[in-house]
Image: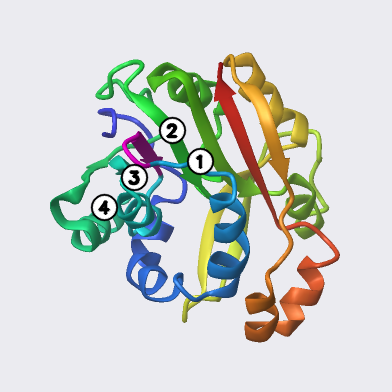
Amino acid sequence: MEKPGAAPPIALQAFETLAEPFAARADTKPHNAYYERPATLSLVPDVSGRRVLDAGCGPGFYTAWLLDRGAEVVAVDVSPKMVGLARARVGQRAQVIQADLGHPLDFLASASFDLVLSALTLDYVRDWDGVFREFFRVLRRPGQLVFSAGHPFADFLLHPAGNYFQTEFIENDWTGFGMRVTVPTYRRPLQAAIGPLLAAGFTLERLLEPTPTPEFQRSDPRHYEELSRQPGFLCIRAIKA
């Protein structure tokens, strides 16, 4: 739910453009299906009978996965097209809401979720202090947060002209979805990723720097070799103890 007069989220237009091709390809695109997703899902606990917030649901891949394993899911995304695709994917099985993670999630009750899952979404939010405080607020004890993001070192390798120690606005050209789209994002140092998490009250349980799966190697040997030697994503599980 966008606040009146607020600046639009930095990547909104890019994901409105990418919505349909992303939904069509991300189930089998190696960086998603055979790299980030297996790593993130390895951190997700048993969700049967648990209430889960899918924060940045995109076209609903994770929402559907959670529902199929017995979770009750509320999904949010800032892109109207992504919200429509997620609703089409899961039907009435989940509540799917258009909302900006850069603002308070005041439509969600405190202590109302057992798990927050946020996959490759937080890079488009500058204020991680605020979003982690909101995730902490909506979680019950002992609730868990699982999220994935761009690896700070990978982002700096792609844009070495900046300052690693600053949170900086950058732009990446995506070509893997059948078109070239410039996607604005933020990169931040590792301390700016972990510090707000701890300041919000979370305890860090596990930090995972994934490596590509054998399926990735068969689909994209060149990027498999690259990601076997240097990081691309960071996956984290934390707990509200």
Percent of width and height locating residue 111? 36, 17
Residue 67 at x, y percent in the picture: 30, 50
Q: Which of marks 1 and 4 is in front?
A: 1
**Mark closest to the chain's N terminus, 3 or 4:** 3
Evaluate if marks 3 and 1 touch, with contact meaning CB atoms under 8 Å apart: no
- Residue under the point 24% across and 24% down: 107
In this figure, which residue is indicated by the disc labeled 2? 115
What residue is rendered at 52% in x and 32% in y? 145
Marks 2/1: CA–CA distance: 9 Å
Q: What element carries label 2?
A: strand
Q: Which three-letter amino acid code belongs to the residue tagged 1?
A: Pro
Q: Within the magenta stretch, is there residue 49?
A: yes
* Residue 231 left/right relative to 185: right
How many residues crowd mark 4 within 10 Å: few (<14), some (14–19), many (20+)? many
Q: Nearer the viewer, mark 3 or mark 2?
A: 2
**Image side of residue 91 versus residue 140, left or right:** left
Q: Which of 235 and 42 is in front in this view?
A: 42
Tag shown at residue 83: 4
- Residue placed under numbered mark 1 in the picture: 45
Helix, strand or loop at disc 3? Answer: loop
Residue type at the position of mark 2:
Leu
The span from disc 3 to disc 1 (Cα, nearest Å) is 26 Å
Which badge, 3 or 2, is on the more N-terminal residue? 3
Image quadrant holding the C terminus, namely top right
| Residue, disc 3 | 78
| Residues marked 2 and 1 touching at CB (< 8 Å) | yes
